[in-house]
Amino acid sequence: MNHIDLSAYYRLYSFSDYRSMKAALPYMQRVVLAKGLMEIEEAEIRNYLWRIKGKGYKNYLGSLSRQEPKYAAMQSLITALQLLYKSNGYSARYIVIERR
């Protein structure tokens, strides 16, 4: 199961279908969010993403030195999902955020 570290405390997992997400949940220690991607709102994910002081949220596809200013939380989540897509090879319909 591939994951992305969203911050020092949280990891993001993506799943292509509901059944695979439900099957993986018992193996995770502290799930803080498990939802369909289309149901996620920006206010729900702000606390889980890596925030760069004065610049917004991290672009997971780029390096820290060339961050775009005012990066929104939803855009940051999308870049993390794009990075997961590169390693998994399937699109995310459901996501799980776990506290380490």
Image: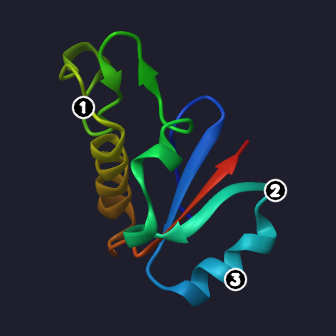
Looking at the image, the residue that sits furthest to the bottom is: 19
Numbered marks: total: 3
Q: Amino acid at mark 3?
A: Ala
Q: Secondary structure at mark 2?
A: loop
Figure quadrant of the N terminus: bottom right
Q: Amino acid at mark 1?
A: Gly
Residue under the image location 55 percent in, 32 percent down: 7
- Find residue 92 and name its label: none
| Within-10-Å neighbours for mark 1: few <14, some 14–19, many 20+ | few
> Decide: marks 2, 1 in contact (CB < 8 A)?
no
Q: Quadrant of residue 9?
A: top right
Q: Secondary structure at mark 1?
A: loop
Residue 45 picture location, percent across and down: 50, 46
Residue 14 picture location, percent across and down: 48, 66
Q: What is the CA distance from the residue labelled 3 to the residue labelled 2?
A: 14 Å
Residue linked to disc 1: 62
Nearer to the camera, 99 or 73: 73
Nearer to the camera, 72 or 79: 72
Q: Amino acid at mark 2?
A: Gln
Residue under the image location 29 percent in, 55 percent down: 82
Residue under the image location 60 percent in, 78 percent down: 21
Q: Is residue 69 left or right of residue 48?
A: left
| Within-10-Å neighbours for mark 3: few <14, some 14–19, many 20+ | few
Where 100 sits versus 20, above or below? Answer: above
Mark 2 or mark 1: whose residue is earlier in sequence: 2
Q: What is the CA distance from the residue labelled 2 to the residue labelled 1?
A: 29 Å
Residue linked to disc 3: 23
